[in-house]
Amino acid sequence: MIRKFITYFENEGKNYTEDLISVVQDRLDNMDNIKYVVIASASGDSALKLYEALGDNIKIINVSHNVGFTAPNEKDISDEMISKLSNLGIETYFGSHAFSGANRGVTNKYGGHAPLDIVADTLRMFSHGVKVAAEISIMAADAGLVPVGEEILAIGGKGHGVDTAVILTPVNSKDLFDLEIHEIIAMPRQ
């Protein structure tokens, strides 16, 4: 039997970013099998804070919104931040969201629901951040930035900042239902 603790935050939101990073740092100090952390940080701010806490001890991959998410041809992260993260060894990935992407384009035009909407909403039953953590791990795996079949730590949230961390084994999107969530390290209660 393994006994571990989960940190619960009262609500979702950016107010918990520093606390979440501290919890992640504590967990990683007691694990030697995790080599990759994937973090959802549209602006790069949370990825930078994570690096400041963890340093070079682990490979950090920042997943931002796809180009055009907010406005056509625009990134939600500045070129200056991309360069700053890159100089620290953090790669920033831009790609269509694994659970929406082109599906959203179809449902926006024709209505209805796509099967991936059901997957996303099911994961949101835990928290929005759990959905995001699963989604960005698939995106990073599809881009070849994290290995499939190896446990990683994935960090997500809703909107700005991060409030959720999970240990999971990522898969490529074609193997969606083989994704394994092993541990929830922290998440909001609501």
Image: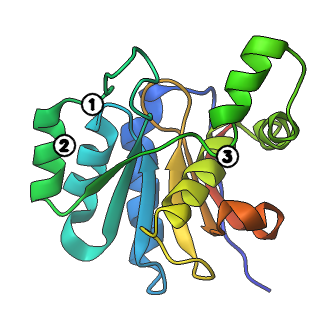
| Residue type, numbered disc 3 | Val
| Horizontal arrangement in the rendering, residue 12 relative to residue 176 (left or right) | left
Distance in Å between CA atoms under marks 1 and 2? 7 Å
| Residue type, numbered disc 1 | Ile
Q: Residue 149, located in which quarter of the rendered image?
A: bottom right
Discs 3, 1 touching: Cβ within 8 Å: no
**Percent coordinates x, y for residue 46 in the rendering:** 33, 40
Discs 2, 3 touching: Cβ within 8 Å: no
Name the element at disc 2: helix
Discs 1, 2 touching: Cβ within 8 Å: yes
Q: In terms of sequence position, does the residue under pointer 3 or pointer 1 come before the other?
A: 1
- Indicate which disc residue 82 carries: 2
Q: Residue 189, located in which quarter of the rendered image?
A: top right
Q: In terms of sequence position, does the residue under pointer 1 or pointer 2 come before the other?
A: 1
Above or below, 48 relative to 91: above
> Which residue in the protein does label 1 denote?
77
**Percent coordinates x, y for residue 102 in the rendering:** 66, 34
Nearest the eye: 121 or 153: 121
In the rendered image, which quarter contains the C terminus?
top right
> Which residue in the protein does label 3 denote?
130
Camera sees residue 170: yes
Nearest the eye: 77 or 173: 173
Q: Residue 11, located in which quarter of the rendered image?
A: top right
Between circles 3 and 1, the one closer to the viewer is 1
| Horizontal arrangement in the rendering, residue 104 relative to residue 31 (left or right) | right
